Amino acid sequence: DQQVKQNSPSLSVQEGRISILNCDYTNSMFDYFLWYKKYPAEGPTFLISISSIKDKNEDGRFTVFLNKSAKHLSLHIVPSQPGDSAVYFCAASVNNFGNEKLTFGTGTRLTIIP
Amino acid sequence: DVKVTQSSRYLVKRTGEKVFLECVQDMDHENMFWYRQDPGLGLRLIYFSYDVKMKEKGDIPEGYSVSREKKERFSLILESASTNQTSMYLCASSYLNTIYFGEGSWLTVV
């Protein structure tokens, strides 16, 4: 049972435009959410996170939005750049007093078209 | 910067061989993880460890075991490799809900 879902396996966006990556979750106990970026043949790198007490977190070109009632989060990248082309994973965890483990989605491959 | 190092980037092993994947982190993190990544399936947790000599099964532990004798080192063991274990294996450590990954080990079982 996939508790974290990324329903779009791929997305293509023109350079300079906004990229919106979506993620849905089913476990209402999740209270911390993260986005990771992965280039081929490399490990994922942490991008941005959000706690369930917030509905938005911004870091430069990256903004994550959380809609708890819809169990939905999204990552906005604006403006999109060629270096943003990668696979993006969303992940979620339940606060377990330091013993958290992440549940990942299946990933969305973002391609930025120059 | 957090450094998670996986000793082998690319391995080719035969069916039935015992395979060791080694991972070392340099940030004194208590939590360490082994994931595998497969196309269309995302990252799936194999095993994790909250402390030395402690281990817990993740979502897909079958066919794998782990060892954590020292805080900085977490080993993944394939007791008898099979072709369906061909995959990219990712080691990670975590602190305050953020996981830091190594570069990955590509294992091909023939």
Image: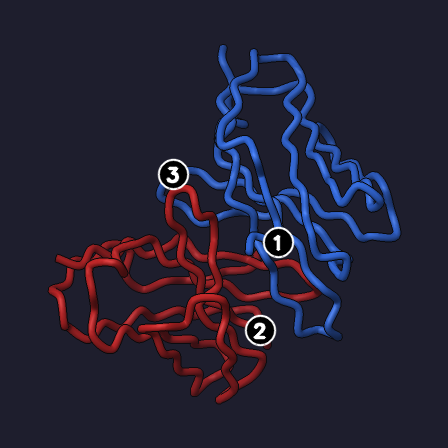
Chain colours: A blue, B red
**For residue B35, what is the image quadrant?**
bottom left
Mark 3 — on which chain does it sit? A
Which callout, 2 or 1, points to the residue nearer the camera? 1
> Which residue corresponds to the image point at 59% horizontal and 59% vertical from the top-left?
B99
What is the total number of numbered labels drawn onto the structure image?
3
Which residue corresponds to mark 1? A3
> Do marks 2 and 1 share a chain?
no
What separation in Å lies between label 3 and label 1 (alpha carbons)?
Answer: 25 Å
What separation in Å lies between label 2 and label 1 (alpha carbons)?
Answer: 22 Å
Mark 1 — on which chain does it sit? A
> Which residue corresponds to the image point at 70% horizontal and 32% vertical from the top-left?
A62
What separation in Å lies between label 3 and label 2 (alpha carbons)?
Answer: 25 Å
Question: Dot 2 lies on which element?
Answer: strand
- Vertical placement of B73 versus A63: above or below? below
Q: Give x and y (percent) for residue B27.
A: 57, 69
Which residue corresponds to mark 2? B31
> Do marks 3 and 2 share a chain?
no
Q: Give x and y (percent) for residue A41.
A: 35, 43
Question: Dot 3 lies on which element?
Answer: loop
- At label 3, the amino acid type is Pro
> Which residue corresponds to the image point at 19% horizontal and 75% vertical from the top-left?
B18
Mark 2 — on which chain does it sit? B
- Vertical placement of B42 versus B22: above or below? above
Instruction: Check disc 3: other Cα within 10 Å, few if <14, some if 14-19, many if 20+.
Output: few
- At label 1, the amino acid type is Gln
**For residue A28, what is the image quadrant?**
bottom right
Front one among A9 and A101? A9
Pick the quarter of the image with the N terminus of chain A: bottom right
Question: Dot 1 lies on which element?
Answer: loop
> Which residue corresponds to the image point at 31% horizontal and 69% vertical from the top-left?
B21
Which mark, by number, is residue A40?
A: 3
